[in-house]
């Protein structure tokens, strides 16, 4: 691996840094976007079961808020209803949607950086290719029919090819995981919205 890096020259270092950053983002997002941390499957039904007996205690609401992203959204509905017992279901949804926007922003954390790496890596590889081409043409001397310096020529070819390949190696997985995480966040957003609507209807039903 070290020999490849040496053969690729200095233009490969930004690509290596980008690959390390992409791997860190992918690892962090896999942990942060786990279903148990965002939207546990049975949380809504459990919350609705507790709410049948009236508003839960502040301790239960605080525990719900710290449980997951979905729990944070649902807890904001309980807090809004406790602050204004006469608020409508629309006002409850607005409060939960406001909290949901902050939650979604956290779910989307670092995804823009990952998309930027996916877009920029091929360009950085192309830059390395251009540097290699400059090395190749720099090995040629006017009037020299021998093909120039063979060592410099080989170095230029190595820089060009390795940087092109490494740019694609970084870009392709970054793009795949960005699309995967993007789809996962979109699915979570829909889950949060539906859960908020369901809880708002449930909380206001006894007061109709």
Image (tube, rainbow, N blue to C red):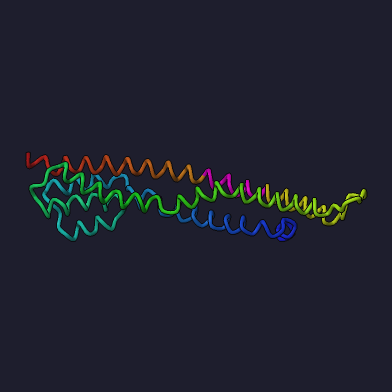
- In depth, the one of 113 and 195 nearer the eye is 113
- In depth, the one of 180 and 120 nearer the eye is 120
* Left or right, 153 with reference to 86: right
At horizontal 48% and vertical 42% (from top left) the residue drawn is 179
At horizontal 57% and vertical 49% (from top left) the residue drawn is 120
* Left or right, 173 with reference to 87: right
What is the quadrant of the N terminus in the image? bottom right
Residue 183 within the magenta-colored segment of the rendering: no
- Residue 144 screen position, x and y as percent: 91, 51
- Residue 126 screen position, x and y as percent: 66, 48
At horizontal 82% and vertical 52% (from top left) the residue drawn is 153
Q: Which residues are magenta?
A: 165-176
At horizontal 18% and vertical 43% (from top left) the residue drawn is 200
Q: Is residue 196 above or below residue 16?
A: above
- Residue 174 screen position, x and y as percent: 54, 47
What is the quadrant of the C terminus in the image? top left
Q: How many labels, in total?
A: 0
* Left or right, 93 with reference to 151: left
């Amino acid at each position: 691996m070290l020999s490849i890096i040496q053969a690729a020259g200095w233009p490969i270092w930004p690509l290596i840094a980008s690959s390390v950053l992409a791997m860190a983002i992918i690892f962090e997002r896999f942990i942060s976007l786990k279903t148990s941390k965002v939207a546990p499957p049975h949380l809504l039904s459990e919350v609705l079961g507790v709410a049948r007996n009236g508003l839960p205690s502040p301790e239960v609401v605080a525990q719900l808020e710290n449980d997951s992203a979905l729990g944070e959204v649902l807890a904001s509905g309980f807090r809004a209803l406790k602050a204004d017992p006469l608020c409508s279901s629309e006002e409850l949804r607005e409060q939960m949607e406001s909290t949901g926007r902050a939650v979604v922003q956290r779910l989307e954390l670092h995804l823009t950086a990952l998309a930027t790496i996916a877009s920029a890596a091929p360009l950085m590889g192309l830059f390395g290719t251009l540097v290699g081409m400059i090395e190749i043409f720099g090995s040629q001397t006017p009037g020299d029919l021998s093909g120039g310096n063979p060592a410099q020529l080989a170095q230029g070819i190595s820089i060009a090819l390795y940087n092109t390949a490494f740019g694609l190696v970084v870009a392709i997985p970054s793009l795949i995981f960005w699309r995967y995480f993007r789809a996962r966040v979109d699915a979570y957003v829909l889950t949060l919205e539906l859960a908020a609507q369901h809880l708002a209807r449930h909380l206001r039903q006894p007061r109709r």
